[in-house]
Image: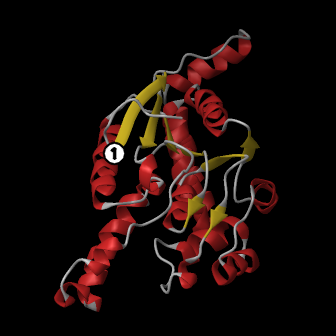
Amino acid sequence: MAAASSDAVVLTEPGPGVRLVTLNRPGVRNAMTAEMTAAWDTAIDAVAADRETRVLVVTGAGSSFCSGADLSWLDQGSADDVTIDRLRDRMLPFYRSWLRPRALPFPVIAAVNGPAVGAGVCLTLACDLRYASRTARFSTPFIFRGTHGGMASTWLLPEAIGVTRAREMLFTGREVEPGQALDWGLVTGVADDALAAALESAARIAEAAPIALRLTKTGLEQSAAGLEASLQWEALAQPVTMTTSDLHEGIAAFRENRPPRFRGR
């Protein structure tokens, strides 16, 4: 796809409750430059502040999803800028910016329209669901660039595909094609048009009760703490939803065999 705007990141509203963020620097394969990172933060701030947002879709313009972090600045600064402490102070905010989908209160879907490399893979893993085009490729060649993996790659990959497969991706740096990515659980689905598949899924999710939807995303994050933590969370979250008007609407819609009209209250 080609984004109409010249902005580094383009925010649009393709449907009710659905927001679309497009990384829009196809000439550099949507690399995470300083300009792109600042534009990304601005777009995510806007989406997070929009109470009508129920689902966010993230994709790339052109033939790539994201080629990862742009490290060209390492060769442009003075030696004083390339100390371990200063690099750490720079990298942590960068990681946290691009991993923000994980902390958003509503589901985020990655439409992986082409290759995702390094930190670009981590961005897809920060999303809740991932749809890949048939031209998508996933690779984490950090150590073949002379660097350790970043952006929580050593946690996100094992969480998604298991330790053994994460080791293979990180140790070999090889490309994982869509079919294998689907077998591994790296992606949710594969389609000729990843964006269309992601938007179809987003439209379906946007029809759900928004309070219950947000609490479910939080509950899935809580599940990492184990069974008892999940039980304690659900014993609070389910009663919260039982006090909403949306619950009564959902029951009425089921009885009347019609689509529910949830209002988020």
| Residue occupying image coordinates x 48% and y 85% | 147
Type of residue at label 1? Answer: Ala
Location of residue 132 in the rendering, given as x and y in whole percent from the top left corner: 68, 47
Q: Answer with left or right where residue 128 lies relative to residue 73.
A: right
**Which quadrant of the figure has residue 164?**
bottom right
Q: Answer with left or right where residue 85 lies relative to residue 209.
A: left
Display colour scheme: secondary structure
Between 200 and 145, the one nearer to me in the picture = 145
Q: Is residue 237 above or below residue 192?
A: below
| Residue occupying image coordinates x 35% and y 60% | 97
Let me know if residue 104 appears in the view.
Answer: no
Q: Residue under label 1, please give it.
A: 8
| Residue occupying image coordinates x 46% and y 71% | 151
Residue density around tag 1, few if under 14, some if 14–19, many if 20 or more, within 10 Å: many
Q: Is residue 259 above or below residue 31?
A: above
Between 201 and 26, the one nearer to me in the picture = 26
Location of residue 74 in the rendering, given as x and y in whole percent from the top left corner: 30, 79
Q: If the image is split into quadrants, where does the C terminus sit?
A: top left
Location of residue 26 in the rendering, given as x and y in whole percent from the top left corner: 45, 47
**Which quadrant of the figure has residue 76?**
bottom left
Let me know if residue 94 appears in the view.
Answer: yes
Location of residue 2 in the rendering, given as x and y in whole percent from the top left corner: 48, 34
Q: Is residue 249 above or below residue 71?
A: above
Q: Residue furthest front?
A: 27
